[in-house]
C-alpha cells in the first residue's frame, strides 16, 4: 500500500514561522513534523510515499530528498498553488496507482499511531466471503478523535464502524484515512477541490467506515501549540 502526505498548505496561523519554513518542516522535539509521519509509516512497512507541496515546496524536497535516509521511497507532486486535499489527490493520482492508499496530513503529530491497522480495512467481500458489488463497497475508512478545543462540534458520528453526517455524539476527523482512487474520478488534475464535501457525499450513502483513535494526536495549527509540544514532558504526559 502507498501513502500520501499532504504538505501543500500555507500555514497562515503559524506565521511568521511559515514565511520562511514550510509548516511540515517545523520541528516537534527536534524532528520535523513530516519526518515523524514518514518514520511512523515506515515502521508499519509502508515505504512508498507521495508528498504534495506548494508553498516553499522545494525546501521540502531539498530537506527530505529521496527518502532513503528514512527507509522510504519518496516521490513529489508539485502544485503551483495549493489545490486543497481532494485536488491534491487528483493531481497525484498517476503516482498513487489504482489500489487503495493512505492519506494523512503532514502537520499532525501522532507518533504512536499504528498504520499497519489500515492495510486491510477496505474489504471487497462481505463477512461470508461473497464479493461485494462495487456500489456497495466502502470508498474510504477514516479515523476520528475526541473533539479538540478548536473544533468542538466535530465532523461525523460513528455507529458500528460506519460514519454518518447525522447523529450524536460527533467526533473530529483525525486527517488519517484510506481511500479508493475511484473516489476522485470526478476531479480533474489541477482542479481545486476540498475533501470534506466528498466525504459527506459518500457518508450519506453509507459507504465510509471508520474507528476512533484514542492515542496521542495533535493537529499543530498555532505557534502556541507548537511551543507546548516542545516543552519538556511533565509527569506521565507523552
Image (spheres, rainbow, N blue to C red):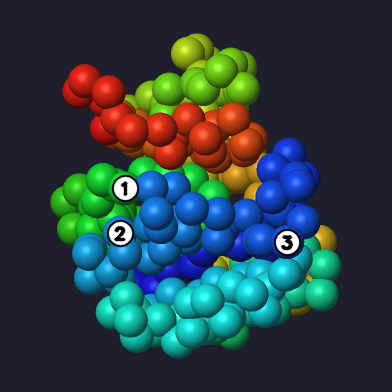
- Residue 91: image x %, image y %? 69, 75
Distance from disc 2 to disc 1, alpha carbons, whole Å, reads 6 Å
* Rendered-image quadrant of the C terminus: top left
The residue to which callout 2 is attached is: 40
- Nearer-N-terminus badge (2/1): 2
**Which residue is the site of mark 3?**
20
Question: Could you tell me how far apart the alpha carbons at marks 2 and 3 are, in whole angstroms?
Answer: 26 Å
The residue at 26%/45% (across/down) is 112
Q: Nearer the viewer, mark 1 or mark 3?
A: 3
- Image coords of residue 173 (percent x, y): 51, 36
- Residue located beneath label 1 in the image: 111
Of label 1 and label 3, which has the lower sequence position? 3
Q: Secondary structure at mark 2?
A: helix
Q: Find numbered disc 3 in the image and state the secondary structure of the residue it sits on.
A: helix
Q: Element at badge 1?
A: loop
What residue is at 53 percent from the left and 38 percent from the top?
226
Amino acid at each position: 500500500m502507498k501513502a500520501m502526505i499532504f504538505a501543500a498548505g500555507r500555514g497562515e496561523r503559524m506565521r511568521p514561522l511559515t514565511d520562511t519554513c514550510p509548516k511540515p518542516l517545523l520541528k516537534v522535539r527536534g524532528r520535523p513534523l513530516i519526518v515523524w509521519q514518514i518514520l511512523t509509516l515506515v515502521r508499519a512497512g509502508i515505504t512508498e510515499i507521495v508528498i504534495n507541496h506548494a508553498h516553499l515546496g522545494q525546501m521540502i524536497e531539498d530537506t527530505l530528498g529521496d527518502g532513503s535516509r528514512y527507509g522510504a521511497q519518496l516521490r513529489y507532486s508539485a502544485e503551483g498553488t495549493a489545490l486543497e486535499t481532494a485536488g491534491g489527490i487528483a493531481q497525484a493520482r498517476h503516482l498513487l496507482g489504482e489500489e487503495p492508499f493512505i492519506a494523512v496530513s503532514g502537520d499532525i503529530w501522532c507518533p504512536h499511531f499504528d498504520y499497519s491497522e489500515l492495510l486491510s480495512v477496505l474489504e471487497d467481500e462481505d463477512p461470508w466471503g461473497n464479493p461485494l458489488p462495487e456500489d456497495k463497497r466502502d470508498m474510504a475508512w477514516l479515523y476520528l478523535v475526541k473533539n479538540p478545543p478548536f473544533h468542538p462540534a466535530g465532523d461525523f458520528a460513528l455507529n458500528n464502524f460506519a460514519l454518518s453526517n447525522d447523529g450524536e455524539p460527533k467526533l473530529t476527523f483525525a486527517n488519517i484515512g484510506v481511500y479508493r482512487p475511484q473516489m476522485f474520478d470526478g476531479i480533474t488534475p489541477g482542479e481545486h477541490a476540498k475533501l470534506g464535501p466528498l466525504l459527506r457525499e459518500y457518508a450519506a450513502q453509507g459507504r465510509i467506515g471508520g474507528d476512533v483513535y484514542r492515542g496521542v494526536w495533535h493537529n499543530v495549527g498555532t505557534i502556541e501549540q507548537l511551543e507546548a509540544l516542545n516543552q519538556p514532558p511533565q509527569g506521565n504526559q507523552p
